Amino acid sequence: MTGQNRKSQLKALFGTIDQGEGNAGRAAEPNAAPTAPDAPPLETKAFGLAKIVPAETLMRPRTSSGAVKAMGLSLGGLSREVEEARRLKESLDTVERVIEIDPGLIDASFVSDRLGRDGTDEGLGELVRSIEANGQQVPVLLRPHPDQAGRYQTAYGHRRIQAAARLGRSVKAIVRSLSDTELVLAQGKENTERRDLSFIERAFFAHALIARGFERGVVQDALSLHKAEMTRFLQVAEAVPLRIANAIGPAPKVGRPRWMALAELLKGEAARVKAQDEITSSGFCATTGSDARFNRVFERLNRRTKPPAPAPMEVHGAAGRTIARIDTARGRARVDFVDKFEAGFAEYLQAELPKLLESFALSRKPKG
DNA sequence: CGATAAGATGCGGGCGCCAC
DNA sequence: GTGGCGCCCGCATCTTATCG
């Protein structure tokens, strides 16, 4: 597929989504698809009730009128009105209306964009409360299920559907006939706009799309990815086994550098065995929060290569009491005095410290 | 509560590979 | 040789956490 084709495909898809969903609380796409030459005027399509005055009608030059011509014009006008009425009816029939659907009839998208959130999604409870209090503000996008008549497949709005199911309510939805490509592109675009997917979820979503044969450029466009980012997504998704990523979960606070570091560690077979062992441990299962679970796995794999930071050393006074602590973590030395010191001590320390350092340097020099 | 450090994210641009 | 593509490095900016 050429870049031009890709762009027109995206424009055709997303331009119409935004136009049809003015109540979705999102700004219209700045480069939305231009209205097709044979499409009804924009106001007809968007609002249905607006007065229809095609531009060509307004531009048509007036001609002199005889009785016959007047009748012809009148008939012509009538036929135009009939034609416009037909168009209006057509647009009303095809315009995307929000309908209510039982969540039990709705299946998830064929490409998952979530990791290990089933039943443990921290934000879902909040969404349930919001919908309970204010109703569902934004409709979800569905398509008729390609294999099962009477059922639907989700393009986006999975969490809203889960929340509605939990409340025992129907889901406000727009149903549109979508190809596989259109469905995943809508799904990717929506997730990108909402910024509610973590790094690793986006990585696996991009990877899943590539695995299903979607072109790299299409995936980049749909997820608004820079080419370099796309490369890193695929590298991480290939290096981190899905079962491990699923066990960890979305880890929203863990970004690219740490997932890439984990992916690097997981390239070794021994590390994969260790990670598998970690995710089945009781401690891991008892850990709440995907960020904490990530840290457990990461620290377990990193344990050998990165020694723990040394504990602060205590300096004891004549009576054996701790008078100061020396912290050498992160490659620097820091001295904290336990008690307040007398006036002038800082100046004394300032004067004596160079001598102390010099004396230390001399003691380190090899003798002879 | 402001300053600072650490981490996350987006992006530019160089490089190598490959098809034409 | 040229252009397209993917990989990689590194920088700038923004956000979040920590410290004093």
Image: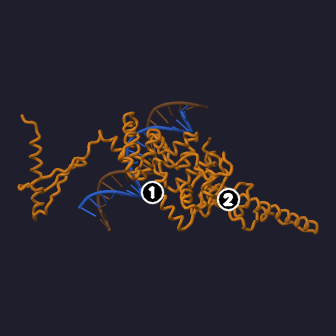
Chain colours: A orange, B brown, C blue
Indicate which disc residue A96 carries: 2
Circles 1, 2 touching at the beta carbon (< 8 Å): no
Instruction: Describe the element under mark 2 as helix, strand or loop.
Output: loop
* Between A164 and B10, the one nearer to me in the picture: A164
Query: Which label lies toward us, 1 or 2?
Result: 1
Which labelled disc corresponds to residue A290?
none
- Disc 1 or 2, which lies upstream in sequence? 2
Q: Chain of mark 1?
A: A
Q: The residue under label 1 is which amino acid type?
A: Glu
Residue A120 screen position, x and y as percent: 46, 53
Q: Which residue is mark 1?
A: A122
Amino acid found under the numbered disc labelled 2 = Glu
Q: Residue at x 56, y 58 (%)?
A: A165
Q: To which quarter of the image does residue A349 belong?
A: bottom left
Q: Is residue A116 above or below residue A160?
A: above
Q: Residues within 10 Å of mark 1 (few under 14, many from 20)?
A: few
- SS assignment at label 1: loop
- The CA span between labels 1 and 2 is 32 Å
Check if mark 1 and mark 2 are on a common chain: yes
Residue A38: quadrant of the picture: bottom right
Instruction: Assign the C terminus of chain A to one quadrant of the image.
Output: top left
